[in-house]
Image (tube, rainbow, N blue to C red):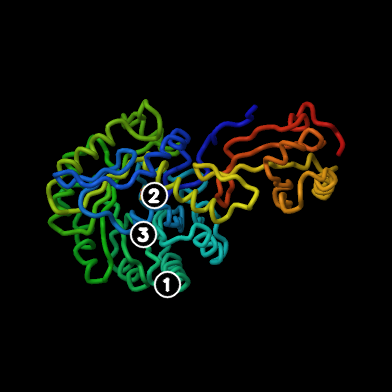
Amino acid sequence: MTLTGRPPLPSSERHDGKPHYAPAARRVVASASARPLEPPDLSGLQRLPMSSTFRGSLAVGCEQCLEGRKMVLFVTGRCRFRCFYCPVSERRNQIDVTYANERLVERDEDVLEEARSIGAAGTGITGGDPLGVIDRTVHYVELLKREFGPEHHIHLYTHEPNPEKLARLARAGLDEFRLHVPSFLWGDLAGAGSAYRRVLEEAPSWGVRRGVEVPVLPGKVPELRRLLLALGRIGVDFVNLNELEFSPTNERKMWERGYRQEPKGGWGVVGSQAAARELVRRFSGSLPVHFCSSGFKDGVQLRRRLQRRAERTALPFHRITPDGTLVKGIVEVPGPSATLEEVRQRLDRSRRVPPDRYRVDERRRRVEVDPVLLRRVARTLPFPCFEVEEYPTADALEVERTPLNRAAFPSRRPTGG
Ligand code: SF4
């Protein structure tokens, strides 16, 4: 019997600050994500899994993200823009915290360890707005370049068209930035939009690639089309269009504006994906344009990152699932009267669990055991035993838990060890 299902709420964030771990996307993409890239059609349109498409070439940051080789460095939750669709989760939104993937950063080594744990070829810096903490952002760019070399590719998202800060980041080693143009400025980037135009025009002189990345608002397609034409004339390196998504933190504002969630599941907004695909399909200029669907972010990018982390961090007795999650047996310590040492001694006495098939986890007050062996001995143990499935991430989010013995049911737990 399974006690818990999929996680009730996302516990972490993707590169663009959106919640991930979307349950519906998790198990349906195994074959899609393994499919090789299809050749472009006669019009130059290329298809990716999960309805994503592009024409021209993908940005380097996107290629690495697609392969799960990009670390997400969330430098701060603070942001002075208040986009109604902002999906940043409650525990990060407007809070000055730093995360490397799902790991809370307290010192530089946390960032470096996390990059090593996925074998990162690059880093995507996001927030909040990274330009709001420019000294910190410059520090991380320099740190990553110093540690992993110039080939470690770094891209950054920002809403702030600030040439001084972006030029400073370029000098520190930033390879690519993506400017988030606010939806009320979509169009030909004249008048109030000219600050964004200036940054995009100047950026090549700083030696950095520049693109624009925006969510597709279904009611603003004509303005977005005009923006694409303007960006083509400027000659930006790429444009990324994201599917507009619901999140627990933006849903009230989204509903108030009349947006509705895709009835077939997932986080997508009705009409966003269709509009984006149509924009990419019909776009005829030489500007590289890429539509990245919500399903692709969860089902391909995230899944591959999890697989890479699982392969690099799993213990020999953990079982890695095709989704990149880890299956473990666990023995919990029931209350303060029992100790981890008692659990360890009982396992040793059973003679059916060799010392190299378990590990004592002091922090979580539990012993992790080979799940196959624990199934064999669980009914002889007076401690709660479970088989759990967890993400291989620093926060080790648990997605499923199956009791293996009577002690695992609270009402039937024995009082002593
Ligand atoms: S710029 Fe990004 S982080 Fe800031 S409010 Fe808008 S969506 Fe949220």
When asked about the image quadrant of residue 64, the answer is: bottom left
Q: Which mark is residue 149?
A: 1
- What amino acid is found at the position of numbered circle 2 in the picture? Asp
Asked if residue 43 shows in the view, the reply is: yes
Instruction: Report the quarter where the C terminus lies.
Output: top right
Instruction: Report the quarter where the N terminus lies.
Output: top right
The relative height of residue 170 versus residue 265 in the rendered view (above or below) is: below
Measure how far apart labels 1 and 3 are at the Cα level. Answer: 18 Å
Please, what secondary structure does the residue beneath circle 1 have?
loop
Residue 2 image offset from top left, x and y in percent: 63, 29
Q: Nearer the viewer, residue 402 or 320?
A: 320
Give the mark nearer the N terminus: 1 vs 2: 2
The relative height of residue 81 versus residue 267 in the rendered view (above or below) is: below
The relative height of residue 198 versus residue 94 in the rendered view (above or below) is: below
- Residue holding disc 3: 156
Residue 39 image offset from top left, x and y in percent: 23, 47
Please, what secondary structure does the residue beneath circle 3 have?
strand
Residue extending farthest to the right is: 416
Residue 180 image offset from top left, x and y in percent: 30, 52
- Residue holding disc 2: 16
Asked if residue 190 shows in the view, the reply is: no
Mark 2 sits near ligand 1, with its Cβ under 8 Å away:
yes
